[in-house]
Amino acid sequence: YDPPEQNALATAQGEDEMPSLCFCADVQTLKTDWMYAYSVDYVSEGKAIVDYLVKDWWETRGMTRPIKIGALVMGDMQSGGQYWSGLQAGSAANPGKCELKKQESLRSQTAWASEVDALKDRDAIVFTTVGPASATFLKEVREKGYQGQLVGVTISALGFWTLISGMVPKSGLDGMLIPHAWPLWTDDTDFVANMSEMLDK
């Protein structure tokens, strides 16, 4: 399921005691006993993105002014509003350390002149688009000369990587951040070591 379908069936699933699994968590699914998800909810992810960007800006880079964060948010998907709530929560948790600016988009959008123009002064742009919108936005923002940090969300980049990497030159993707809630095979963790050992056996 996607979260909207899962939420629509929540009452019936509870009555039937039938569990369901979703790729991504939703603030509503977190409140039920019969719905499970692979990843964190969008609000928590948005907050974590701001926390990371602020920490990197102030502590790692040693900057002395607030980081300017732009957000390209899908207005026609509930995930867009949830990501925006998370970004706002991250900003509130880091008073005086960041400035947020929001631009709304549609999931079917493929031209980005006004959005790029509105966000070109940002140090980082977080985009919550999906599918062709992600690829065309990344292509256009780089073609128009944006050199700042690009940050995809879990639904915007990894699931559409073949499409994105086919449209955007590697130089335009280099350094892009894409958060996710899962370990990589290259991580030095007990979990990965255990999985590798099990696969070898």
Image (spheres, helix red, strand yellow):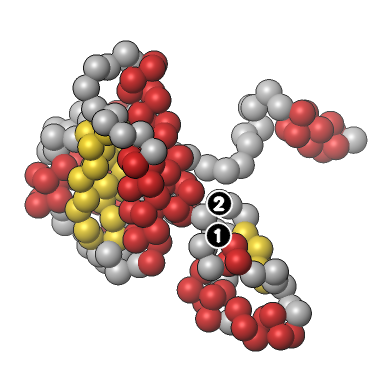
x, y percent for residue 59: 38, 17
Q: Are marks 2 and 1 in contact (CB under 8 Å)?
A: yes
In screen coordinates, is 160 left or right of 149? Answer: right
Q: Label 2, secondary structure: give it.
A: loop
x, y percent for residue 149: 29, 31
In screen coordinates, is 89 left or right of 23? Answer: left
Of residues 164 and 122, which is closer to you in this image? 122
Which residue is depicted at the point 48% across and 49% down?
44
Q: Quadrant of residue 63?
A: top left
Which residue is depicted at the point 66% across and 63% down?
36
Of residues 112 and 22, which is closer to you in this image? 22
Q: Give, as a three-letter code, the residue at label 2.
A: Val
Q: Which residue is mark 1?
A: 25
Q: Is residue 90 above or below residue 65?
A: below
Q: Earlier in the sequence, mark 2 or mark 1?
A: 1
| Label at residue 40 | 2
| Label at residue 4 | none
Q: How many marks?
A: 2
Q: Label 1, secondary structure: give it.
A: loop
Q: Decide if residue 33 is in sight here.
A: yes
Count residues near mark 1 (Cα–Cα under 10 Å), then give few for <14, some for 14-19, many for 20+: many
Which residue is depicted at the point 38% across and 46% down?
89
The answer for how far apart the CA atoms under marks 2 and 1 are is 6 Å
In screen coordinates, is 174 left or right of 64? Answer: right
Q: Decide if residue 161 is in sight here.
A: no
x, y percent for residue 90: 38, 41
x, y percent for residue 130: 36, 57
Q: Give, as a three-letter code, the residue at label 1.
A: Ala
Quadrant in the picture for the N terminus: bottom right
